[in-house]
Image (cartoon, coloured by chain):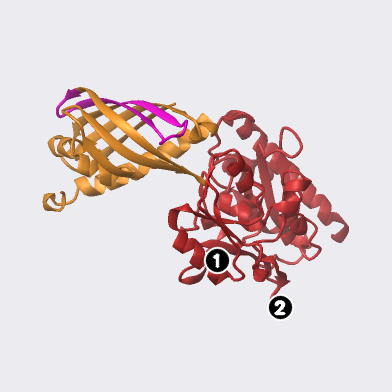
Chain colours: A orange, B red
Amino acid sequence: MRIEQSFTVGAPPDRVWSLIRDPQVMVGCVPGCDGIEQIDETSYTAQVTVSVGPIKARFNLVIEITEEQAPTFIRTESRGEEGSRASMVKSVNEMRLAPVDDGTEVSYSADVEISGRLGRYGAGMMKKIATKLAGKFEESFRTLAEAPEEVVG
Amino acid sequence: MMAATFHKPATVDDAVRVLTDAGEGGRPISGGATLVAMMNAKLVEPDVLVSLSAIAELKDFGRAPDGTVRIGAMRRHRETAFESDLAGGQAVVAKAASQIANPPVRNMGTIGGSISFADPAADYPPALVAADATIEIAGPDGRRFVPAEEFFLGWYETAVEPGEIVTAVLLPPAPDRAVGHYEKLCRVAGDFALASVALVLALDGAGTVTHLRLAVGGCGGGPVRCPEAEALVVGAVPSAERIAALAERLVEDLDPVDDSRGSAEYRLQIVPRLIAKAFEEALTEMEPAR
């Protein structure tokens, strides 16, 4: 399934970029994420829990930055599985930053494949749930990016 | 599969305590109609199961002097479907209960369990919104009350927080001479709805609509109600044109998905027909009295 969204943040692209590239910021903004660790210059591991009804799937993700043009574009690929279970998730993600009058327009897309427990739900419904989670990310990210700089960290 | 620890507390307070202590791995179990199937399929593997089946107050059905009905969370669908005290507008809930899945599920499944699971295509959610129900929830800080319209947050998400359980569904008295109807379309008998319409309708002696609450199921993350659409019919005679206008306005608020049962587009096409049918049935039911 493909998810495409865009939102505007009241902060300049340089600042938005530095936040997006800060793993600790991402831990706080990605819904269900409780840890990101840098492996090398371009790879990270992360733990993300996705809940749909009573099903709670905790994924161990490996995220690789495959292309990066600071401060306007980043492409990542993530792969992950849920412990010993058969649930798998794979995604290719792109994010673009563009200056606008009142800050930065952030547009992103993700092509996501899910199999296993969560794959039992139809793609239509998973897309609605993913879009809802994306909305939560936007809200947390915007709050953080628009806050005075000292607060961040 | 790891065996779950099984608890069977006798009071709501004890159930909440055990559930809170169990943390993330804890899960309440009422009728088990959905949860046991999910456990069998290894989709859910709770560490601690808290059975609600020994808590007497959850099995009660009662009517307060002001006409408010209290349906305990452990009431089975079958009991609610045959509840003779659910008449008039409140009957919409009994009618929805009678169309849930199949007899074995109706014998086991409970109203508290069903609404806590909150399948977007389930039968109770639109009926409870149409009936203006309130959900009673117990947690570590006592009981709280949430209107049905604010209970279903969408795509299997409800207002129930970790450590809380649904204890009852409260139905306010419907207006005099109100009729409740539940219209469901499914591909095969016993299936979840492709789409469904629940309504509570009352007319005055001149045939003018004095009360209307209508909710659609299966066409979004939770039941969809549109007061603006209802206002197109309230205060007027419910003509086919007015009902069509209501349906046209309400369809704008729907958010269905394509799934194995049908496409989103198909759902948008059938909802106006289900709404027309629901009005027709409700008006027919009123006729002897009018």
- Mark 1 or 2, which is nearer the eye? 1
- Whole-percent x, y for residue A100 in the image: 20, 34
The picture quadrant where one finds residue B196 is top right
Image quarter of residue A24: top left
Percent of width and height locating residue A17: 17, 35
Q: Residue at x 70, y 40 (%)?
A: B274
Left or right placement of residue B99 versus residue A105 in this view? right
Provide the residue designation for mark 2.
Answer: B65
Identify the residue at horizontal 29%, vertical 37% (top origin). A46
Amino acid type of the residue that numbered disc 1 sits on in the rendered structure = Ala
Mark 1 closeness class: few <14, some 14–19, many ≥20 residues within 10 Å:
many
User: Same subunit under labels 1 and 2?
Assistant: yes
Q: Quadrant of the N terminus of chain B?
A: top right
What label does residue B144 carry, if any?
Answer: none
Residue B258, relative to residue B123: is it above or below?
Answer: above
Label ID, residue B15 = 1
- Judge by depth and name the residue closer to the eye, A106 or A39: A39
Q: CA distance from mark 1 to mark 2?
A: 29 Å
A103 part of magenta stretch: no
Q: Which residue corresponds to the image point at 27% horizontal and 34% vertical from the top-left?
A: A45
**Amino acid type at mark 2:** Pro
Mark 1–mark 2 contact, CB under 8 Å?
Answer: no
Tell me, yes or no, whether the highlighted magenta stretch contains residue A78. yes
Mark 2, other Cα within 10 Å: few <14 / some 14–19 / many ≥20? few
Q: Is residue B150 left or right of residue A9?
A: right
Residue A42 sits above or below residue B149 on the image: above
- Most extreme residue toward the bottom is B65
